[in-house]
Amino acid sequence: MSETKITDYKLLERLGSGTYAIVYRAMHKTTQEILAVKVMAKSKASHSAMDNIISEISLLKKLKHRHIVEMRDFLWDDANIYILMEYCNAGNLSSYIKQNRTLDEDTCKRFLQQLALALRYMRQNDVSHLDLKPANLLLTKHAGTYTLKVGDFGFAQRLKPYQENTAVKGSPLYMAPEILLKTSYGPAADLWSVGVILYECLFGQAPYSSKSLHELAERIHRNDPITIPARPAISAECRQLLTSLLQRDPAQRITFEKFFDDPYLDLAHVACSENLHKAIALINRAIEKEQRQELGAAYRAYCQGLQYFVPITRAESDPAKRQLLRQRVLSYLKRAEMLKQQIYATSQMLDQPHKQQQQPTTSQNIRPSDRQLPSSSATQEVSSSPSKGTPGGTDPPNTRRESDLVELAREYENIARGLQIGRQADKDASENRLDVALDGYTTALGLLIPALHKDIEVEQKRLLRQRIEHWMEEAEHIKSIRSAQIMQEMESTGTNHYGCIVQ
């Protein structure tokens, strides 16, 4: 307890109210700092309400994360208990959805990433929120970008993965079925709520939206199936994640581990200072490898660096810094595209030794910028121009073993089709038809991966696995390049779909 008194603050307008609390915007009379103050009348608080207040204060004292509302202090007097929290100046996700009716998938994904980062931190501390809903997800806005923060930990409690509870907590529309049906529940109840929130962001209302609590309870008890609307259209990856979150049976629901590792969320590449350092290190490695004429390794490092740089560029709110980052992304994108062309041209020469030897395409002297990144004091990038020569190493699969795969293809029609589609995808990628190539790699992998479970000769299976891994890597590289290209196209035309940014 600090020496601060509630009389040090001037309560301004009312922001909202709950079961036993009213929240006000408040200003410190001396420093002019703006905070949110949650006021709870002692006379109106039941024993369970007091337990919730004590639990909320206890948890907020320990939870410190950029996507969790920070508690600055707590105070009391004869009449009330006061929780002083950071003020979120853009309302909450519920009002944001109502203003926009539905949110585009890109915005939904970025809000979901922020919520997932908060949940991952909470799980690391064995904390379950148990009242996740749009009204409890507060928003701050700075320089046109939004940051989401989880608030209202009144129902939260510590639950280890194997622990369960039976007390009914939460808001019915977002409450997991196992809670509403009054069976025991565990931390996975929060994942159902995440699914309902994502559904509402995408389609404008919760999947079990009802006119009354009685109607809602009936729909839950009847086990009404949740249908995902055809409009607005969403990606297959988004649909898959949404479906896995909205599994009524918690045993069938996606686990926290798989949720945090889901490739659609891609938490590994969200914008943060740590990932900026990784991005710089990867670009340094790419330039070094290119200087050594290890072109395959250089190409991979450029693509991996772009996977970090694109979300970092999108997240930068300072226009000048953002422009510098965009220039860097464009520079690295051009290098990656040129290296891909050079690698393909060289592999074509190696595939046709009986034809007249052609000189490999040489690199153009487009030098990545050697100026220090605007938002980091990390190691400066190497800026020497790559030298000319033949590529070192053979990055595509060894063509001398192609005959082994041809023999395997004669025995299995799906393997033959998969290899044919994958080779065409290689050709499409070399000719810069990246979307077509990505579709081809995806189709090829869908045919080839199941073949690994077939009873085939060990060496053939090893070669097939190598080819699959190579095409999986190529698909990831295309995704990073397309992400950079799309960002450049959107920003060059003045289009901005990045209203919600991970900070």
Image (spheres, grey):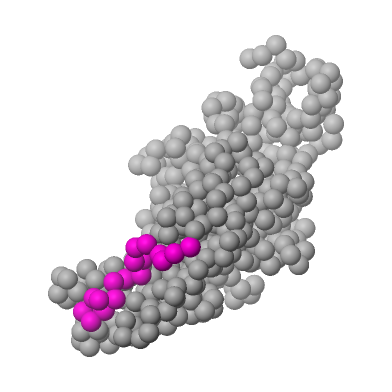
Q: In the image shown, does 452 or 321 lie closer to the viewer? A: 321
Which of the 4 image quadrants contains residue 209? Answer: bottom right
Marker count (numbered)? 0
The structure residue drawn at horizontal position 23% and vertical position 82%, both measured from the top left corner, is 403
Q: Magenta includes 393?
A: yes
The structure residue drawn at horizontal position 46% and vertical position 34%, both measured from the top left corner, is 125
Q: In the image shown, does 131 or 258 lie closer to the viewer? A: 258
Which of the 4 image quadrants contains residue 488? Answer: bottom right
Q: Is residue 212 left or right of residue 336?
A: right
The span picked out in magenta is 388-405
Q: Is residue 477 visible?
A: yes
Q: Magenta includes 400?
A: yes
Q: Is residue 135 visible?
A: no
Q: Where in the figure is residue 447, as x and y percent of width and height?
A: 34, 78
The structure residue drawn at horizontal position 65% and vertical position 58%, both measured from the top left corner, is 107
Q: Is residue 64 left or right of residue 144?
A: left
Which secondary structure dominates the residues rendered in magenta? loop
Q: Where in the figure is residue 315, as x and y percent of width and height?
A: 66, 50
Image height check: is 276 above or below 226? above
Image height check: is 423 above or below 502? below
Quarter the C terminus occupies: top right
Quarter the N terminus occupies: top right
Task: Kindly give the residue lying farthest to the top in the view shown.
Answer: 3
Q: In the image shown, does 370 or 464 lie closer to the viewer? A: 370
Q: In the image shown, does 350 or 201 lie closer to the viewer? A: 350
Image height check: is 154 above or below 214? above
